[in-house]
Image: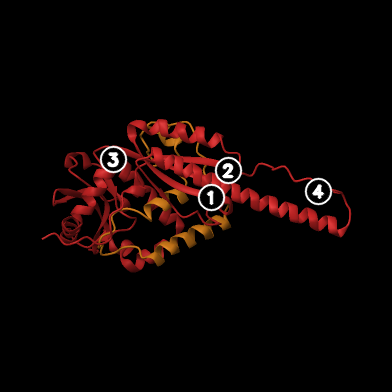
Chain colours: A orange, B red
């Protein structure tokens, strides 16, 4: 398991594409509005431009991995 | 001292063994808990509204370190849950104020959630991103290149510009073709908007940000197909991410017709 963690680093930007745009959104009493989601991206952009943009893209090898898509804990 | 509590919705499942949730913690460090209704089970964890209430939440969203920690925990929990059965993850930061509200979600959303669970069951998602190739392209020969005259300079500049726009056009065409080919072998496909400049250093040249739903048993084969197809296109560079939980296909319509 630890190996597959190391093998599948997930770029935050790819993760946010998914967790901010999909899923169950019915009538949460507190949910992110579109403006809130934009805010997240604005914060991310500010971080990346101030630090380095290397973190935004983690090249993924083509080597197929077993279905155990565990992200970093 | 008591603080007001909310419930962070991690995911909805069919019927996970509640005993297997023991020992798992969610966003904010609280213990995962199951709330069952309408044949579905919501997996939630308690969160402090001083941190996750509407107002503090907005402030925290500006702290990308906070967002990252929360997003990664949310993802990690969804992956853990996927060991127990099909999972429809909740959108990040979907918070309820009571068990009753969660029951209401399950009851009202039953049809849509059930369809999403069926769609993702036994399947994984691959992300495929394509960029205009950065490999040097042959520059069209322009007569009299060299220092030359101002007219030569302009001619060369125009040639370079048109080569670049041709490269972009060719890349877009390849991306369309690749997407169509992958969509054909996938159970379902979806295109995310290209990642914006600043988030991805190569965003300006991104021509495809696709997600493909694939049977888990054929997941490796799909990745091979991507590699095979990708090697046939000189105009684009292709990047594979995943396998993911089928986030991009675990979408539940915002409003469901009330059920009785």
Give the CA separation, mark 1 to mark 3: 31 Å
Name the N-terminal-most of marks 1 and 3. Answer: 3
Name the residue carrying label 1: B207
In the image, farthest residue toward the left: B260
Locate residue A38 relative to residue B158 in the image: left or right. left
Indicate which label's residue lies in the foreground, 1 or 3: 1
Indicate which label's residue lies in the foreground, 4 or 1: 4
Name the residue carrying label 2: B236
Tell me which residue sits at (35%, 63%) in the image: A32
Name the residue carrying label 3: B82
Q: Residues within 10 Å of mark 2 (few under 14, many from 20)?
A: many
Name the N-terminal-most of marks 4 and 1. Answer: 4
Give the CA separation, mark 1 to mark 2: 8 Å
Give the CA separation, mark 4 to mark 3: 59 Å
Name the N-terminal-most of marks 3 and 2. Answer: 3
Name the residue carrying label 4: B142
Indicate which label's residue lies in the foreground, 4 or 3: 4
């Amino acid at each position: 398991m630890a190996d597959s963690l190391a093998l599948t680093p997930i770029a935050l930007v790819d993760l946010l594409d998914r967790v901010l745009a999909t899923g169950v959104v019915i009538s949460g009493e507190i949910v992110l509005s579109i403006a809130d989601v934009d805010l997240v991206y604005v914060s991310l952009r500010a971080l990346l431009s101030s630090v380095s943009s290397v973190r935004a893209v983690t090249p993924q090898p083509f080597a197929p991995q077993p279905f155990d898509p565990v992200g970093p804990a | 001292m008591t603080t007001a509590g909310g419930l962070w919705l991690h995911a909805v499942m069919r019927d996970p063994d509640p005993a297997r949730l023991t020992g798992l913690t969610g966003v904010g460090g609280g213990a995962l808990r199951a709330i069952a209704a309408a044949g579905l089970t919501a997996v939630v964890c308690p969160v402090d509204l001083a941190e996750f209430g509407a107002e503090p939440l907005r402030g925290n969203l500006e702290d990308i370190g906070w967002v990252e920690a929360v997003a990664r925990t949310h993802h990690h929990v969804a992956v853990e849950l996927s060991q127990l059965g099909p999972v429809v993850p909740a959108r990040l930061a979907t918070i309820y104020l009571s068990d009753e509200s969660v029951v209401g979600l399950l009851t009202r959303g039953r049809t849509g959630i059930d369809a999403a669970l069926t769609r993702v069951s036994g399947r994984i998602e691959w992300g495929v991103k394509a960029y205009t190739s950065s490999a040097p392209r042959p520059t069209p020969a322009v007569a009299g290149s060299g220092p030359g005259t101002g007219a030569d300079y302009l001619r060369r500049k125009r040639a370079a510009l048109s080569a670049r726009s041709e490269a972009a056009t060719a890349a877009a065409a390849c991306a369309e073709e690749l997407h169509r080919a992958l969509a054909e072998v996938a159970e379902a496909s979806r295109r995310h908007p290209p990642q914006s400049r600043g988030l991805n250093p190569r965003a300006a040249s991104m021509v495809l940000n696709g997600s493909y739903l694939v049977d888990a048993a054929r997941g490796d084969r799909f990745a091979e197909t991507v590699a095979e197809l990708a090697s046939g296109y000189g105009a684009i560079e292709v990047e594979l991410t995943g396998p993911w939980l089928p986030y991009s296909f675990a979408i539940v319509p915002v409003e469901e017709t009330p059920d009785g």
